[in-house]
Amino acid sequence: MAELEIRREEGVTWLTLNRPATRNSLTPSLLGELREICVALAADASVRVVVLSGAAGVFSAGADLMGFMASMHGADPLEAADVGRLAAEALLALPQITIAAVEGHCVGGGLVLAASCDLRWATSDAWFSAPELDLGIPLAWGGMQRLVELLGDTMASELVLTCRRFSSEEALVHGLISRRIDSDFSAMVKDAVATLAEKPGAVLRATKQQLQAIRAGSFDAQTDAAALLAALRDPESQRAAQRYFARRAARAKGQSTPPKG
């Protein structure tokens, strides 16, 4: 059974952490495979959205500590300890919009992977924690930086230092997730992802470039003008604008909304 399940649909690639017997704990081999598929996806312009989830109603219980302890007694322990960071950074570097679809546990290294996506959507009963300090290790893989960026210094420090669990409700309040879905999670995620994947590919990529530049502290608003002109010349973006104005005109006339196609 593959540790990372890959499913492709039009414009969307679904990546599923697939170790349900261990609540999708993260092995060095799984993280290495995740990094490799992200490198391949980065070169695939047909993919607009990448969704990361976990099998059997659980996102991830974090690193497989026994597997990592074994690998860190090998020939290159530093390389083994760094594999999670490389996977998280490969997720961050993707030019596609990335979404973490979180059910159940989202713990430790799993939280770092989720925080490396652009968006995080969670079920109402999902919960999050960073228990590393209780295990006698620091939060690694760039996780501290991700959480400070998302939550701010004070909240990130409190969650990492106390190691306490926090609910999806609290995650929503503090901005870790943007959607808390109470029912039909899989169906609602699929519908929302399909809607996102319908948007013009060039504009999605331009928006991702803006997000990446802002996160890196290198954003220059002067580049927005060139991105705007490129979109105005893009045939797919032009068709999207025509559909938008057609729908708005129909609403103004009290008509039913025209089809999206």
Image: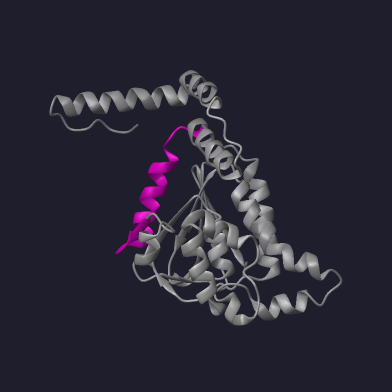
Among the 4 quarters of the image, the one containing residue 69: bottom right
- Toward the left, the furthest residue is 254
Above or below: residue 207 compared with residue 123: above
Residue placed most toward the observer, 40 or 111: 111
Look at the image and tell me whether residue 106 can be seen.
no
Looking at the rendered image, the quarter that the C terminus falls into is: top left
Among the 4 quarters of the image, the one containing residue 108: bottom right
Measured from the top left, where is residue 163 in percent x and y? 51, 76
Query: Within the magenta stretch, is there residue 195?
Result: yes
Question: Looking at the image, what colour scheme do you see?
Answer: one colour
Count of marks, rendered view: 0
Question: Bounds of the magenta span?
Answer: 179-201
- Toward the right, the furthest residue is 75
Side (left or right) of 189 relative to 78: left
Measured from the top left, where is residue 123 in percent x and y? 37, 65
Measured from the top left, where is residue 113 in percent x and y? 57, 61
Looking at the rendered image, the quarter that the N terminus falls into is: bottom right
Side (left or right) of 86 relative to 210: right
Query: Within the magenta stretch, is there residue 197?
Result: yes
Look at the image and tell me whether residue 97 can be seen.
yes
Q: Residue at (46%, 32%) from the top-left corner?
A: 200
Q: Considering the whole magenta stretch, tell me its main secondary structure.
A: helix
Q: Residue at (53%, 58%) from the top-left corner?
A: 148
Above or below: residue 211 compared with residue 14: above
Residue placed most toward the observer, 173 or 99: 173
Q: Residue at (59%, 73%) from the top-left corner?
A: 25
Side (left or right) of 186 relative to 212: left
